[in-house]
Image (spheres, helix red, strand yellow):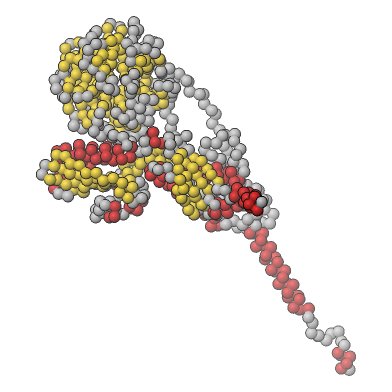
Amino acid sequence: MEARADYSLLRPRPSGLLPWLILSVAGHVLLTAGGLVLSWAFAGPKVDLEQQPIKASLVRLGKPRDEKLLPRKEEEPPPAPPKPAEVPVPAPAPPSNAVKIPSKDAKPEKAPDTKKSLFDALNKASKPAELEGALDGDPHGDSAVQEGERYYGLLKSVVQRNYDVSDAIPEAERRTLKAEVALWIGPGGELVEVKLTKPSGNELFDSAVVGAVKKAAPFTPPPPNLAESLKKRGVAIVFRATD
Amino acid sequence: MTRLLLAALCVPSLAFAQQAVIEINKANFRPMPLAVAAPVAQDDAAKRASAEFDSTLLYDFTACGLFQVLDRKGYLADAKEGVTAGSIAFNRWSDVGAEALVKTQLSADGDTLRADLRLFAVGAGREDLKVSDSAPSKDARRLAHKLANAVYRFYTRETGPFETRITWSRKSAQGRDIYVADWDGKNAQRITSDSVNVLPALTRGGVAFTSYRQKKPFLFISRAGGEPTLLLAKGAMVTGAAFSPDGKRLAVSVTEGENAEIYVANADGSDPKKVTDTKFFLNTSPSWSPDGKRLAFVSNRAGTPQIYVMGADGSGVKRLTFQGNYNTTPAWSPRGEVIAFTARDERNAFDLFTVNVETGKIARLTQDAANNEEPAYSPSGRLILFTSTRTGSRQLFVMTADGQNQLALPVEKGDYATPDWAE
């Protein structure tokens, strides 16, 4: 009788299936949570369907000034109004069917870095937008299309904007003034070091060229292919007072 | 062979390791931010002279165009701070934007005022210049000019304008009078006190001007502020006197009927020679080139008054201005390259321009500030003195040769005209 009961299918028996079942459920939960985190982390930019498009129209070129008339004074363009600091708002996790639109600034492959966004916003607010290429470049030039060249173009333009030299230097002396500065830039665009490698002999000029580099810093972070070189070998800038 | 292999291995890696080079040309030249601390007076007599000394020094540095003098309201100077490099908190001066710092000490010994000026490079925290001088206590202004000149010379290696002289004609109850003053318009001495006296021109030890004192408007000269004497009487009117840079010759415009011609004479008025000859036209306002070989002048021979240049003997006449239809009062820059002049633009405003003697390129110096006329260069050519109606009446203003830093001379209001400037 007892032996028959031993073989009964209704009798509860110890089973090794339960741990696997629990493991399986936990694994699925983890996978689902991981998937959600990854989809949030690698989400593209939020598409605001309510946003109105920016309309721009170019002002027609006016008639050239009659050559017989006396010239008007060449005036510098008025300074741009200060931009309010952009406060980044962390975007909520977009729906899984969010449309990814590639844009100039966004990098959809990477998670949005709040600290970097804030730094960039403050950087933008405190400094005028950097121009592509060089200030003295040709409007049809394409030498800034390569990332490296483009970066050096940006560097040149931002230093040039801060290249202020005292009027006290005699005009005759200005024609021969030349100095060289070496600077090292960190991966975040910070100025690691600046050195006057070839002084001009004129202290006002020498301090002005070093000052131009210091005032221009911090720079835009260098592209990955230049980061190491700019940190270790640096870049040299040759300054001349006149053309 | 081994060396060759080593070199072959090293050369590409060296090229790879080469530092990138960026070239930047053409600096933005701008005035140097300069802080001028209030003078430290060491006794009561020095305190009395301190205000005049201070205002003169401040004006000199502000108006010369080399410096951007920082407003004292923008910083709190530490009263306890010393005047030597070791006792100065340079970081505080650097924080307010100063690149150079001037500190002065004044002391009096009887009737003599002594000033010690120190110039510091703020960035380097270093004393660049120390200069001391003294003058009678009543000449605190002259003392300030001398010390300002030392600072100016330190930077530019040129003589500063602070001890130069200017002259002008000013409307008076009787007509117009001639004045000679320091470069800032102070210490003005009236040379004439009757009749109509206009168009003064400075020469060594004197000032020549056109005067109606003997009925006909002829050229007179006052030497060392003395009684004017006749210098040149010719035709119906002698105007626009200009002495050559070496002071030996004199160019004038002599009017007869409807015609005016340029004459060049000896500085004492003797041996006048006609150097232009255009019947029925006017040739006026001569101005010497810095080498004394050429003259700029105004002529209406082409229908409207325009600027011309020619040799001092009248040879090689060349028209310089082709824009605008009323260009007058040329002043040849002592630096030689350009001639400043007054022009009436299409809005009927009188403004100052320069024309490049070689290229004919015109640049505007003044704009949208009422009428600006009658330029006169400083002896170094760095500054221009001119008249402007921007404050109502016709006042004297000074600016840099490229039209920057336009400042009114600190003189009382009046109707000022035809300034001239000399050492």
Residue visible at 27% across and 28% down in the picture: B396
Q: In terms of depth relative to the viewer, which is nearer, B278 or B52? A: B278
Looking at the image, is B353 positioned above or below residue A188?
A: above
Q: In terms of depth relative to the viewer, which is nearer, B256 or A174? A: A174
- Image quarter in which the N terminus of chain A is found: bottom right
Residue visible at 31% across and 42% down in the picture: B69
Report the number of discs: 0
Residue visible at 14% across and 22% down in the picture: B226
Q: In terms of depth relative to the viewer, which is nearer, B363 or B171? A: B363
Looking at the image, is A32 positioned above or below residue B99?
A: below
Which percent across, then down, holds residue B173? 17, 21
Which percent across, then down, holds residue B269? 22, 14
Which percent across, then down, holds residue B131? 24, 44
Going by the image, does B237 lie left or right of A34? left
Going by the image, does B113 lie left or right of B38? left
Residue B402 visible somewhere in the drawing: yes
Looking at the image, is B28 positioned above or below residue B6?
A: above
Residue visible at 25% across and 53% down in the picture: B82
Going by the image, does B122 lie left or right of A40? left
